[in-house]
Structures are given as structure tokens and as C-alpha cells.
């Protein structure tokens, strides 16, 4: 019988700003530098246009993929490969930087709530300079949604949950990305393969994670990292408190490769980072 992994670390989101002053709450890439293969997890949430209206003007990336998931508001994407897209509430943007891409992400609203998440996922060394840049704008209706008997809801952004598969198919091919919204007191359990990196980020409410006899409370804007599974503990288990709990669950197989990051580039050596800057400055992206 499957047993829950243990929570070994809880991280509080850190308030930062990025782009042209967009206010964010950062966990991976901030409080913790790297959670292989996850490079970054940002939550942007504000109903004050001054916190987000300047957006993220044209900037380069190389060596990783981004997944942007919107809960409220609209974000427009443009890149130097001719791709454009309008990210809607409940929709997902998946971008592969690969050999190099220059893009912008700009809010398309003057007021109201803008709320979403951006995740950076590393690529294998062999794929970084052999993969052409790519972009996919996924509409809300394309994301499978399952309702449990207790009224709880699970949206499948990537990977599989029960008989539903998510539309995001990243280069690694093993990403799980679930949006889990539990009713008060509801329970949740999902199998995660042995050896995979796994974490949850609480979007709303509060939940209890891990086995009953050794569980940990995780509150809103906190990220909980699970220990490496063994054959006896290979699932993520959660129970919502009296107000319910909404959280993102992500998991993927670690790369176990050297990683060097500098600004918008993520490679495997310092020399590759230097080359990325040279290529960008000379227009060879």
C-alpha cells in the first residue's frame, strides 16, 4: 500500500520585484536557489495596477522552459520568432527557450486583479543548444478538470491524474503539474514516482501534508518540499483545514547535472553562459 512522503522543508514566499518593477512572491529561485529541475517559482498577485502594469518588456532566455499559469487577468506574449498570444484566466503559456528566444509578457488590463504563477524548468545539457525555441498558448477549456465526489476539483496542467492528461508536454517528458482545490476537510492523494523531485505551493487556505503521524501544516504563500521517496513512500497526501485548501503540486525527475545560471540564461558551464551573452549581443539568437 502506498504511503505518503514526508515534508522535509517549508519555505515562505519572499517579496521581490522583477521585469519593470512587477511585484512577485518568489520561493524557488529566491529563498531556495534550485530544486532540480525547477529553477524558479513566482506568484504574481495584485489588484493595484502600479504593481504589474509595466510588465516584462523584451528580454532574452536560453536553456530552459517556462510555464505560466493564469488564475485572473490577461497577459500578452510576443517574441522574436513571430509568436503572439493572449493568456486568459485559467489558461497556460508554455515556452521553450532552447537555443535562445527574446520575448515580452505584458498585462492587458488597466485595473483589476492580476494573479498567476510562472515556473522555470531546466533542460538537459544535450537539449539546450539543439532545441529550437517554441511557444504554445493553451486555452482554459483545453485543461482537463475533474470533480471529486466531495466537490473538490483538480485541474491537470501537465502529467496525468486518474484518466486525464494535461496539455503541457515539456521537453523532459515527465512533468506533473496539478491545481488542486480541496473542500474543507477533504483529502487528496497522488502517486509520484520514486526519485522524483516534488513540492506543493499553497495558493489559498491551509492544508496538512504528509502521513497522519508525521504531518506538517502549510499555509498560504508557503512552499513545502517532500523528501525523496522510497518504495514504501511514493505518494503525496494532503488534507484541507476547515476553510479548504488550494495548492499547486509539481513533480519531475531531477537532471543531476551541473547548472550555471546568470540572469536570463541557464547553462551547464561558465563558458556556455559567456557564449550566451556574446550570441545575444551579436544578434545570433
Image (spheres, rainbow, N blue to C red):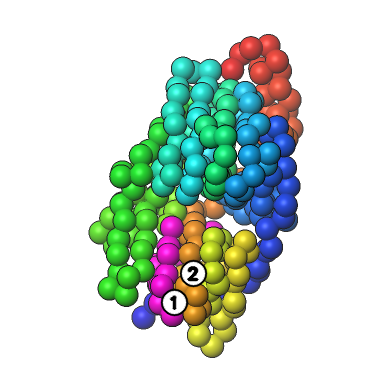
Q: CA distance from mark 1 to mark 2?
A: 7 Å
| Residue at 43% from the left image edge and 39% from the top image edge | 88
* Mark carried by residue 245: 2
Circle 1 crowding by C-alpha within 10 Å: few under 14, some 14–19, many from 20: some
Under tag 2, what secondary structure? strand
Q: Which residue is mark 1?
A: 184
User: Residue 224: horizontal and vertical position, in percent?
Assistant: 60, 66
Under tag 1, what secondary structure? loop
User: Residue 27: horizontal and vertical position, in percent?
Assistant: 66, 55
Say which of 175 and 51 sits in front. Answer: 51
* Mark carried by residue 204: none
The magenta stretch spans which residues?
179-198
Which quadrant is the C terminus positioned in? top right
Q: Quadrant of residue 280?
A: top right
**Residue extending furthest toward the front:** 111
Q: Is residue 260 visible to us here?
A: no
**Residue extending furthest toward the top:** 282
| Residue at 52% from the left image edge and 32% from the top image edge | 108
Amino acid at each position: 500500500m502506498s504511503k505518503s512522503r514526508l515534508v522535509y522543508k517549508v519555505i515562505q514566499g519572499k517579496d521581490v520585484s522583477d521585469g519593470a518593477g512587477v511585484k512577485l512572491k518568489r520561493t524557488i529561485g529566491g529563498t531556495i536557489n534550485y530544486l532540480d529541475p525547477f529553477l524558479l517559482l513566482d506568484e504574481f498577485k495584485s489588484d493595484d495596477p502600479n504593481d504589474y502594469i509595466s510588465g516584462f518588456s523584451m528580454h532574452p532566455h536560453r536553456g530552459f522552459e517556462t510555464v505560466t499559469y493564469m488564475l485572473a487577468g490577461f497577459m500578452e506574449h510576443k517574441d522574436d520568432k513571430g509568436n503572439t498570444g493572449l493568456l486568459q484566466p485559467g489558461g497556460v503559456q508554455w515556452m521553450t527557450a532552447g537555443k535562445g528566444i527574446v520575448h515580452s509578457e505584458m498585462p492587458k488590463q488597466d485595473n483589476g486583479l492580476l494573479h498567476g504563477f510562472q515556473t522555470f524548468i531546466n533542460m538537459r545539457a544535450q537539449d539546450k543548444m539543439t532545441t529550437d525555441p517554441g511557444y504554445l498558448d493553451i486555452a482554459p477549456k483545453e485543461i482537463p478538470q475533474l470533480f471529486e465526489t466531495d466537490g473538490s476539483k483538480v485541474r491537470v496542467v501537465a502529467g496525468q491524474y486518474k484518466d486525464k492528461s494535461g496539455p503541457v508536454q515539456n521537453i523532459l517528458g515527465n512533468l506533473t503539474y496539478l491545481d488542486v482545490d480541496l473542500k474543507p476537510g477533504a483529502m487528496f492523494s497522488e502517486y509520484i514516482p520514486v526519485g522524483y523531485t516534488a513540492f506543493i505551493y499553497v495558493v489559498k487556505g491551509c492544508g496538512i501534508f504528509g502521513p497522519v503521524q508525521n504531518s506538517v501544516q502549510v499555509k498560504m504563500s508557503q512552499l513545502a518540499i517532500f523528501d525523496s521517496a522510497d518504495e514504501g513512500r511514493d505518494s503525496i497526501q494532503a488534507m484541507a483545514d476547515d476553510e479548504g485548501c488550494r495548492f499547486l503540486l509539481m513533480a519531475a525527475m531531477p537532471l543531476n547535472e551541473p547548472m550555471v545560471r546568470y540572469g536570463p540564461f541557464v547553462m551547464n558551464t561558465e563558458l556556455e553562459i559567456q557564449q550566451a551573452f556574446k550570441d545575444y549581443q551579436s544578434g545570433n539568437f
